[in-house]
Amino acid sequence: MAKSKTQFPLAQANVNDPFASQVLTWFARYGRKHLPWQQNKSLYGVWLSEVMLQQTQVATVIPYFEQFMQKFPSIEALANTSIDEVLHLWTGLGYYARARNLHKTAQIVRDKFDSQFPTNFDDVLALPGIGRSTAGAILSSVLDAPYPILDGNVKRVLSRYFAVQGWAGEKAVENKLWDLTACVTPTQQVTDFNQAMMDLGAMVCVRSKPKCTICPLEPQCETNRLQAWADIPAKKPKKILPERNTYFLVLKRGSSVLLEKRDSVGIWGGLFAFPQFEDIDQLKRSIPTNICKISPLIAFRHTFSHFHLDISPILVEIPTDTIAENQGNYLPSVSSKTEYWYDLHQPNVIGLATPVKRILDELSLIEKGTHNGTNSLL
């Protein structure tokens, strides 16, 4: 493993220090050791899992990880596929910038590192979508390299153990936690220790109602001594999310529905979605004059990290022999097309925004005659 030039503190503790020893002993008995990315471990597989696990629960990630590994068994296979296919498999996992960065990184590794995932910390850190903790997690997990990590679970364990005041998202607090994680991470058995810290935060030192009586760190935990579990770690300052409204034009002709590809930047970047309008009048002006049926679907709310989006889908059905304006063309590869008809009977390999997939799934059930009305938008 090449030496890093980046001046971040490495692991500093002895594996026999009380903190490390207690955590490792607990992990040997209770830690998670059968997750898919822990089997036949590789830099590629661990990198893929770490990106998927950013702001996403393990249970949600597992089926996506397995699908990706089956479809793209190597970084070269991932690099050589289209972004549409990547986004298609990613649909439903959210935070789609991760998928775009995943594809970019695979292409960089293919072109710059001969399809071999780099082992130098600086090289890994420079890849799109990889931060300090993710880089450390990848290299420590596969190579046992002495890099501490600081994901959300580790932040919570350290904040409570040392009774760190303040929200972990604040730079000063985060820097303090980085110093602490370097101090407690041993120079040996780093693979197990880092996994143990993540498991401890996910399984024992959970956000609400931590299971202190079964925690190996309970006797020395400052938050436990102070009985301040409700206050440590400090919660993120509350912010009222703004609300926005939008209208989806669900233009349907036979079993096909019109979609358009969004710009690569911004919300749902690079994904296919329904034509979107700020108000109903604007939507109506875009409808072909020879429509046969207009049906408002049930409105619903989709929440992003920074705002609520209230969506009103408007179903417009037109005769099958009608040629709608700007309908686009259907091709096996639609990457170069901004609009095209999506066949509900033969869905294509493209990335779909989650609310769009929700509506398409409902329409597909109607087409198949299996819709039972449960949780229906229709």
Image: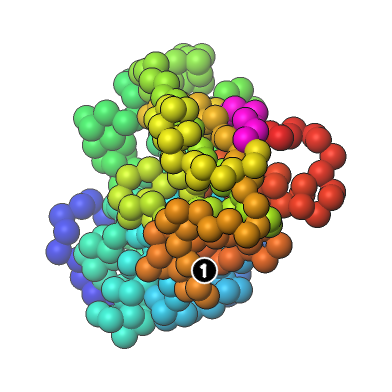
Mark 1: amino acid: Tyr
Q: Give the range drawn in magenta.
A: 294-300
Please rate how many residues cluster around mark 1, counting C-alpha atoms within 10 Å: few if below 14, some from 14 to 19, many from 20. few
Q: Is residue 135 left or right of residue 30?
A: left
Magenta segment includes 84: no
Q: Which residue is found at the position 39% from the left and 59% from the top?
A: 338
Q: In this view, does 47 lie to the left or right of 70?
A: left
Q: Which residue is found at the position 43% from the left and 35% from the top?
A: 285
Q: Could you tell me which quadrant the N terminus lies in?
A: bottom left
Q: Vertically, is 52 above or below 215?
A: below
Q: In which quarter of the image is residue 377?
A: top right
Residue 174 seen in the figure: yes
- The x, y position of residue 5, in whole percent, is 15, 64
Residue marked by disc 1: 330
Residue 14 seen in the figure: no
- The x, y position of residue 166, in whole percent, is 32, 21
